[in-house]
């Protein structure tokens, strides 16, 4: 439930939302990101950057061994309110 609430909040307040798919997802891994443990799931995770939240969706990719199904949503341009919700 927390992950859905964070997704709604991030998409609502982001200046940009970029969808990254397939093998390009792996290039998003960066030391500049920190995990957002409150919404960590088995196949879905969130990472926080300086002004962005990144949703990492691995559902079908893990369940069906289909790396082409990897998908990240990068919600960028978030201010303090957008990153934390208050």
Image (cartoon, rainbow, N blue to C red):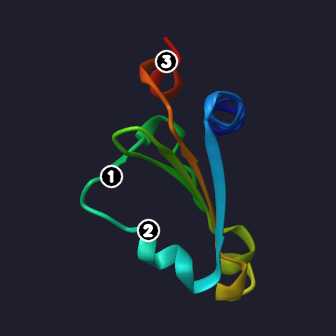
**Residue 38 against residue 20 in the figure, above or below:** above
Q: Helix, strand, or loop for circle 3?
A: helix
Q: Label 2's element?
A: helix
Q: Which residue is mark 1?
A: 33
In the depicted structure, whether residue 34 falls above or below residue 6: below
Q: What kind of element bears circle 1?
A: loop
| Position above or below: 45 against 63 | above
Instruction: Tell me where residue 66 appears, x and y as whole percent.
Output: 71, 88
Circles 1, 2 touching at the beta carbon (< 8 Å): yes
Q: Residues within 10 Å of mark 3 (few under 14, many from 20)?
A: few
Which residue shows up at 34% across the image and 40% down it?
Answer: 50
Residue for point 56% across, 85% down: 23
Counting labels gives: 3
**Residue 26 position within the rendered picture, expressed as x and y whole percent measured from the top left:** 47, 77
User: Mark 3 and mark 1: span between their CA atoms?
Assistant: 18 Å
Where is mark 2, residue-wise? Answer: 28
């Amino acid at each position: 439930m927390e992950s859905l609430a964070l997704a709604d909040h991030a998409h609502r307040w982001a200046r940009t939302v970029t969808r990254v798919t397939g093998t390009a997802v792996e290039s998003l891994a960066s030391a500049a990101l920190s995990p957002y443990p409150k919404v960590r799931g088995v196949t879905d995770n969130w990472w926080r950057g300086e002004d962005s939240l990144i949703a990492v969706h691995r559902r079908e990719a893990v369940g069906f061994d289909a790396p082409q199904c990897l998908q990240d949503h990068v919600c960028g341009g978030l201010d303090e309110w957008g990153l934390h919700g208050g």
